[in-house]
Amino acid sequence: MPTYTLIAPAKINLLLEIIGDRPDGFHELVMVLQSIDLADIIELKALPGDQIQLNCSHPDVPLDSSNLAHRAATLMQTQFPDRGGVEITIQKHIPIGAGLAGGSADAAAVLVGLDLMWNLGLTQAELQTLGAALGSDIPFCVSGGTALALGRGEHLTPLPDPHQLYAVLAKYRSLSVSTPWAYKTYRQKFGDTYAKTSETQEQRRRSGPSVPLLTAINHQDQEQIPKYLYNDLERVVLLEHPQVLALREKFQQLGCLGTLMSGSGPTVFALMNSREEAQLLKTQLEVAVGDPDLDLWVTQFCCSGIQLQTT
Ligand code: C5P
């Protein structure tokens, strides 16, 4: 029985702007998403019947149907019945509850992997439509690279890849942020701002912080990109977790090109031009903070989504 091994990269948000409420309880977003080379490895093996068995190297990851990867397998079985069961083994490298779309990346890998294992021949767009039913970040995780994401996050436009940039990630191991909590708190505190404005969402988008960032990305202007990082959710998460704000400030003091919290946090990243500079920044932050609970990674922007591992 062949084993399919897939590489599932994490993402960072170069931008997350909330421009409105949605009737489905979600928020209307403008995001710029970027894949990085920190990735989970997902192995799929056929099982008899319709069993779904999930294993994970990280003890805190749930192995039942609350796991998005498990739900992705169930969705594929519902859509394509009688193809068989699957054993999913996740080697977790992307931190959990971190704002890096680790769970979404794993689910995207299950969709792509089962399409291959069952010889379905689905297009990338079809896989993304299936993914959108499970989570807002999954369509991006399927295709990866650099993209503008609108709506709930599922309407994607690919952007030129600023491939020379490196991101140092910093996250306190014991701290996770609930994404629903972050959005709910934002809506309670700041929802009035966009509810009362007479501007349409389109007008808000066209006059908002994504404009200079998209110009920089479209011109592949590596110098300008780090200057226009933006995340509305920082307004609630950094207030609640001052130690995360302190990480962001430290990165700034140490002279990074730009720094931001990714997604709903609490991971903070800082951009640098070379691996050497990024490595130095990581060491400097490690020494400056001096907390064994702080995890740090040096990563590089990457231009791929889910990939089949060929070796
Ligand atoms: O779609 P996903 O499961 O990743 O979303 C997690 C949570 O984030 C949702 O339950 C919702 O609370 C919030 N969210 C939102 N608006 C979006 C995307 C996510 O409010 N566009």
Image (cartoon, grey):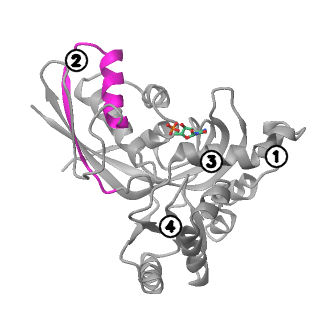
Residue 90 falls inside the magenta stretch: yes
Q: Where is residue 303 shown, x and y percent of the image?
A: 45, 53
Residue 233 is drawn in which quadrant? Answer: bottom right
Residue 180 percent location from the top left of the image: 55, 42
- The residues bearing labels 1 and 3 have C-alpha atoms spaced at a distance of 19 Å
Q: CA distance from mark 1 to mark 2?
A: 50 Å
Which residue does the image show at 33% across and 16% down from the upper left? 78
Residue 17 falls left or right of residue 285: right
Q: Residue type at mark 2: give it.
A: Arg
Q: Mark 2 near ligand 1 (CB under 8 Å)?
A: no
Q: Is residue 230 above or below residue 16?
A: below
The label on residue 83 is: 2
In the image, is 93 to the left or to the right of 55? Answer: right
Tell me which segment is drawn in magenta: 67-93
Of discs 4 and 1, which sits in the foreground?
1
- Checking the image for residue 50, the label placed there is none
Camera-side residue of 233 and 149: 233
Residue 31 is labelled as 3
What element does badge 3 sit on? strand
Specify the amino acid type for callout 1: Thr
Q: Is residue 305 above or below residue 28?
A: below
Between disc 1 and disc 2, whose residue precedes?
A: 2
Secondary structure category for the residue under label 2:
loop
Tag 1 and tag 3, C-beta contact below 8 Å = no
Label 2 – label 3 distance at C-alpha: 36 Å
